[in-house]
Amino acid sequence: MAQRSTLRPLIAGIGLPLLLALLGCGIRAPDPTEAVVEPAPAPDDPVTNPNGADEDGADEVVSVFEEDVDPAVADLAFVANELLVRSYPGAEADDLDEAYAAASVVPVEELPELQTAVLRVEPDRLVTAATVLADNPLIEAVQKCYVYQTQAVPDDPRFESQDYLSRVGLPQAWDLTTGAADIVIAVLDTGVSGEHGDLASKVITGWNVLANNTDSADRTGHGTSVAGIAGAASNNGTGIAGVSWASPLMPVMVTEASGQSTSRFIAKGLVWSVRHGARIVNVSFAPLHCDRLVLRAARHVRASGGLVFISAGNDGRFYEAGIRPNAVYVGAVNASNERASFSTAGPFVDLVAPGTSIIAPASDGGYSGVNGTSFANSVAAGVAALVWSVRPELRPSTVADILFDTATDAGPPGRDAEYGEGIIDAAAAVAAATDVVEQVDASAPLVSITAPIANATVSGMVRVSVQATDASDIADVVLSLDGQPTATDTEKPFRFVINADKLQAGIHTLSCVATDEFGNASRPDSVTVFVARSDDGGEGIETDAVPPRVIINFPIDGTIVSSSVGVQATVTDNAGLASVEWLMNGSVQRSQPVTGTYSVVNFVWDASPAAAGSYTITVRATDRAENHSSDTVALIKS
């Protein structure tokens, strides 16, 4: 298809090069309450795990922060006097207040959509407080509040054309659609200059997350460039052409004046955007593939009908992180369609788009040449807006799949860690959207409560675990207590907490219903439990008199063996398992720790050197209250 003759993506004026790409971390948090930002602890400053020991009997050394397993993430800067804490659905406010007091932290903000609290802590107690909270049965996750900032990348010489538009098939895509006024693109960034000639007619009212007002004027220029690439006013005889001409641009400022932001403010910006009508959210910060709070917020956007695009990063490094299904991560290619030298790689990268030699609006009213995954991300976000403009009824997962399926393969055949699914192809994506037929899932999910087990005696803080499966994504799982909805979880693993000490002693019923993304609801699954109130309102461990349950799955009684034989057993407990041992003729051969209320354990007995005769194998489980239970099978060595 020919390019529209009226399209004139010419450069009206080029200002100084904009050397910005959002990546990495800074040294000060954009927090009006004077949050303290410090570098990450040194790698040799670990947290001692109070629950385990290594094989030599020494304390096992781990970090209370899961992300620190990746050394590159452990090096990131963070707000030294803030913790981001997610509680289990069902946790009650007064119980959480007690947990916070025990850890000597002070709540400063609630993020209810994400079941997360922002807590203030003395900087020298950050790790200690995090350890105390992580060990509390009410708390599901504890993370640092990471700090992200703008950084420069090498800039190319001035350019006189937007050749990247043709490289991704945009002129052909524009023959089918130039966007739609109801497909809003939110730009989470440094703000947007609404006075720019290419943006004045496109920018709608946005939000300043830090100041809690509508002042979203650009402070550094980065957000203006990002917004202009995605949706500058086009076919107007001046300036540049944006990718999606008709899409309104919603500026959501998540940075302070210097261009730095944090996990907390990016997550808040994501939630605000989708609540105020954004279908696409452009987030040009990195490395966000490791930020659990941001990923949960991206999940919230997707469940609400939107799609989040996140820049892969500009440090040129390789990260081990796998696919992150709740957002689309975009890397950059150069003019030769090869991965740009600065573009971060890893299995989490979904797509690549042009990210060098890009002409973008500048905050001074002119134009600049820019490079970075920030701007490749804007191209991809704009293409998604075109796809949705053709078929606004499509689900977010379908839009993402269209972009992946129509991308031009690059690098090794198939998906790879440098190019993801390939280079975005706007023409192919828009064409595919006109014909795609979404598969409709009419089947209901399957749901079951895996803990506590039926007829268990419970007290204190009771963890409820639910397994839900479906042909499509599970939208949510709702837990009810005695027929009344109590809590909702939206992300696997589905887990809840109930304080049994607030219930009347006696029989109670727990039930759950899962709903998939098509609105199909499961049949409820229920278990009946007996509540025995603990005297001190603790975790119920001290008053737990119910022993574990042990079932040897195989081998069965009387099995004849001649060499090695595998032994598998299922162990469950109403409150919490501690250890499992296996015994041969009454003598302990092996012991291993177990946690939770359900576990499948495996052992191997090498019967080769044993004399012919009968042998008894016993699997014995111990719970945290030191109750014991066992199961036994008799084997015959031939």
Image (cartoon, grey):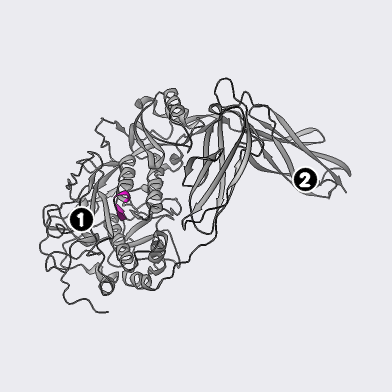
Examine the rendered structure and indicate whether residue 281 appears above or below residue 134.
Answer: below
Residue at (77% x, 48% y) in the render: 565
Q: Residue furthest bottom?
A: 1
Q: Is residue 155 visible?
A: no
Q: Position of residue 13 (x, y in %)?
A: 10, 62
Secondary structure mostly seen in the magenta stretch? strand
Q: Residue furthest front?
A: 483
Query: What residue is shown with label 1?
Result: 225
Badge 1: residue crowd in 10 Å (few <14, some 14–19, many ≥20) = many
Q: Quadrant of the N terminus?
A: bottom left
Q: Is residue 406 left or right of residue 183?
A: right
Q: Amino acid at mark 2?
A: Asp
Examine the rendered structure and indicate whether residue 576 appears above or below residue 607.
Answer: above
556 or 244, which lies in front? 244
Determine which of the numbered discs, if any, sits on residue 247 in the image.
Answer: none
The residues colored magenta run 274-283
Q: Position of residue 158 (x, y in %)?
A: 15, 62
Q: Is residue 527 left or right of residue 583?
A: left
198 or 310, which lies in front? 198
Residue at (58% x, 20% y) in the render: 535
SS at mark 2 in the image? strand
> For the residues carrying marks 1 and 2, which lies nearer the camera in this image?
1
Q: Between disc 1 and disc 2, whose residue precedes?
A: 1
SS at mark 1 in the image? helix
Query: What residue is shown with label 2?
Result: 606
Instruction: Specify the quadrant of the image occupied by residue 2.
Output: bottom left
Q: Position of residue 288 (x, y in %)?
A: 36, 47
Residue at (18% x, 50% y) in the render: 221
